[in-house]
Image (cartoon, rainbow, N blue to C red):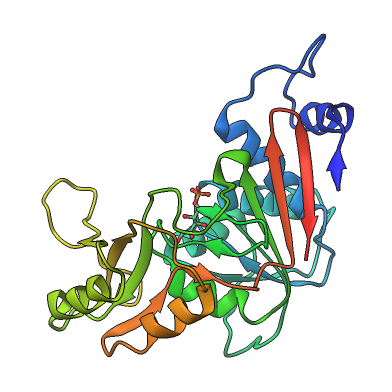
Amino acid sequence: MAIAWSETAASMEALSLSPPMSPPVILTQDELKKIAAYKAVEFVESGMVLGLGTGSTAKHAVDRIGELLRQGKLSNIVGIPTSKKTQEQAVSLGIPLSDLDNYPTIDLAIDGADEVDPHLNLVKGRGGSLLREKMVEGACKKFVCIVDESKLVKHLGGSGLALPVEIVPFCWKFTANKLQKLFQGSDCVAKLRNDGEGKPFVTDNGNYIVDLYLKKEMGDLQVASDAILRIAGVVEHGMFLDMATTVIVAGELGITIKDK
Ligand SMILES: O=C(CO)[C@H](O)[C@H](O)COP(=O)(O)O
């Protein structure tokens, strides 16, 4: 379902962005992320158990939920964070939190993605939170993915960007080599911390992330997924297949809502 620019302009007004006086204004990527995030939060109802995503797009959704709670427009929300970073953000906003042990079924999760294909399959995890995201979003009745239009791809892994894979630190190079051999010509590079010291990034779960750069499309995604997970040492990968129920895309021409 595409929402005409006029409605997007109204969304922009709601975000105190000046609506266009003539042809659409050029919005920054972050403004588009915010528009998609705010649209997704319209699905949130008081009393819900919410999966709180991770990343710069999901951050806008969590901020918006916190704002509506403060304004009294939402109540009795329980948040299930998908990362320590989102947990800290939610605590600062006063969003009550719990976990999957206490809430094994979640009403709605809102989270971003790195890639979205036409079948609503996703690549996630470039922020390093794929395991907790996949656990939380796999427990949801509804998973609304929020992206700006730059994340749309024809084939997962086809953008030349990485497919993140979470692996155990024990003999990680051995596991990385196994992954590389699975996909001919691929490169497998350890994700490093962004402090410039060249040390491996460590996930919230104490594991490493390797970025798998594919030289060609993966073909059958489920076959590729199963093959990756059969490698001992692999914990989880960043393909979220058949998990998103709705994808909200914010673009220069407006908002598009794609339902499964
Ligand atoms: O999967 C994720 C983190 O592990 C993020 O949701 C994904 O990387 C998108 O991030 P952003 O909204 O910052 O582009």
Between residues 16 and 33, which one lies in front from this camera angle?
Answer: 33
Say above or below: 117 vs 184.
above
Say above or below: 41 vs 168.
above
Say above or below: 249 vs 232.
above
Residue beneath the point at 53% across and 53% down? 115
Image spot of residue 88 (x, y percent) = 47, 60
Between residues 189 and 133, which one lies in front from this camera angle?
Answer: 189
> Which quadrant of the rendered structure holds the C terminus?
bottom right
Image spot of residue 93 (x, y percent) = 60, 54
Residue beneath the point at 88% across and 27% down? 6
Image spot of residue 224 (x, y percent) = 44, 77
Relative to 128, 100 lies left or right: right
Relative to 166, 139 lies left or right: right
Total tally of numbered discs in the picture: 0
**Farthest residue toward the top?**
22
Say above or below: 100 vs 209.
below
Image spot of residue 208 (x, y percent) = 25, 71
Residue beneath the point at 86% across and 39% down? 3
Between residues 108 and 49, which one lies in front from this camera angle?
Answer: 108
Residue beneath the point at 30% across and 87% down? 231
